[in-house]
Image: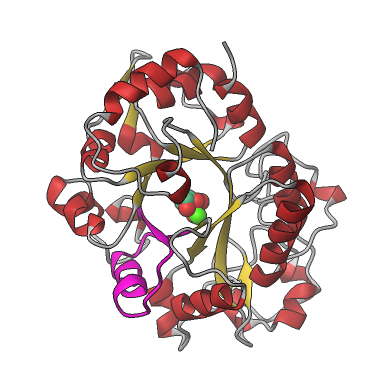
Amino acid sequence: MRALPAVALCALLAACGTLTSMPTPSKSSTPMKDFTVIAHRGASGYLPEHTLEGAAMAHAMGADYIEQDVMLTRDGVLIVLHDLYLDAVTDVAERYPGRARPDGRHYAIDFTLDEIRRLRVHERTGADGEPAFAGRFPQESSIFHVPTLAEEIDLIQGLNRSTGRHVGLYIEPKAPAWHRGEGKDLMAAVLALLVDHGLNDADDKVLLQSFDFEALRRARDELGTELGLVQLIGENDWQESDTDFELLQTEAGLRDVARFAQGIGPWLPQVIQSKDDGSFGISDLTAMAQRLGLFVHAYTLRADQLPPALGSMPEAVRLLVEEVQLDGVFTDHPDQVIASLGAP
Ligand code: G3P
Ligand code: CA
């Protein structure tokens, strides 16, 4: 968490008058409104996503939280990976020919940890095999590997100790319902690993996020976690889960979320929309959620994919902080967001 420039702080303190609570632990311990910088899949603008190297870089850049998307291997080990399949970020197709499912993809859950450890991780590629983001870390220099969640927690806790900083974990168990269909209880596995690391209290700097409303509700009500929970909001046609994301953008839907969660994670275009004439519009989602005591962390701000109406990174950050009045943002470029927060 970090303090804002004075102008932004004044505007935000005015807005705070309508809030009932500031749910994240560090918010309750400071009188100042903060802006939370979440390193999306690590410092993924600079190093391949979800690598230990990228997580270490994000820590050094000063992110408040580092994000982990997680899933299970065939032998039940939690790994840090975004897609359910390995194709877009590893050399799995060359290393394990004949192991794809009928859709042509190599699913992580079909491989043991030992097999996954032999893969080389590279920058994300698109369906055409070309880098998804031109200008990011070169494919030919990729010497990275898929980490386990335990390894990444150990890294971040170790860096917290050696630097004296307190960077949090922001964990998304990916597709819990899909994992159940594969015979695995992903949410329970994540919570058990966190307990093993001494992490299960409301004031631990760990947030658990999911697109799946029912999975998040179960984590609180049935699995008994006390960690902060964040309901991600997507679009219904993404088929992320059975959750009705239209409903979640209404007051009734947000009230349901507020029964068990501390925050929401909307897609950026759900809170600020670029218009054809170059201007932008701001939805009432952020204010509505905050009135119900939910913090709002939107995803994903990328320096190399900024919506034109948001201008440069400093201008985009100013808009998100002062106009949209977000509580934080997921970003591939935590250093640039942090620098922008400190800009005069
Ligand atoms: O979890 C926040 C953001 O990461 C959601 O999108 O697809 O990158 O997991 P995704
Ligand atoms: Ca995520």
- The answer to which of 181 and 323 lies nearer the viewer is 323
Quadrant in the rendering for residue 16: top left
The answer to whether any part of residue 5 appears in the image is yes
Query: In which quadrant will I find the C terminus?
Result: top right
Q: Which residues are magenta?
A: 207-233
- The answer to which of 93 and 315 lies nearer the viewer is 315
Q: Residue at x 46, y 26 (%)?
A: 307
Q: Residue at x 72, y 65 (%)?
A: 154
Does 276 appear in magenta? no
Residue 241 in the figure: left or right of residue 100: left
Q: Position of residue 43 (x, y in %)?
A: 67, 44
Query: Is 200 placed above or below 126 here?
Result: below
Quadrant in the rendering for residue 341: top right
Query: Is 61 placed above or below 190 here?
Result: above
- The answer to which of 86 and 48 lies nearer the viewer is 48
Q: Position of residue 228 (x, y in %)?
A: 41, 59
Q: Position of residue 164 (x, y in %)?
A: 72, 47
The answer to whether any part of residue 312 appears in the image is no
Query: Is 293 placed above or below 115 here?
Result: above
Quadrant in the rendering for residue 120: bottom right
Does 228 appear in magenta? yes
Query: Is 62 placed above or below 89 here?
Result: above
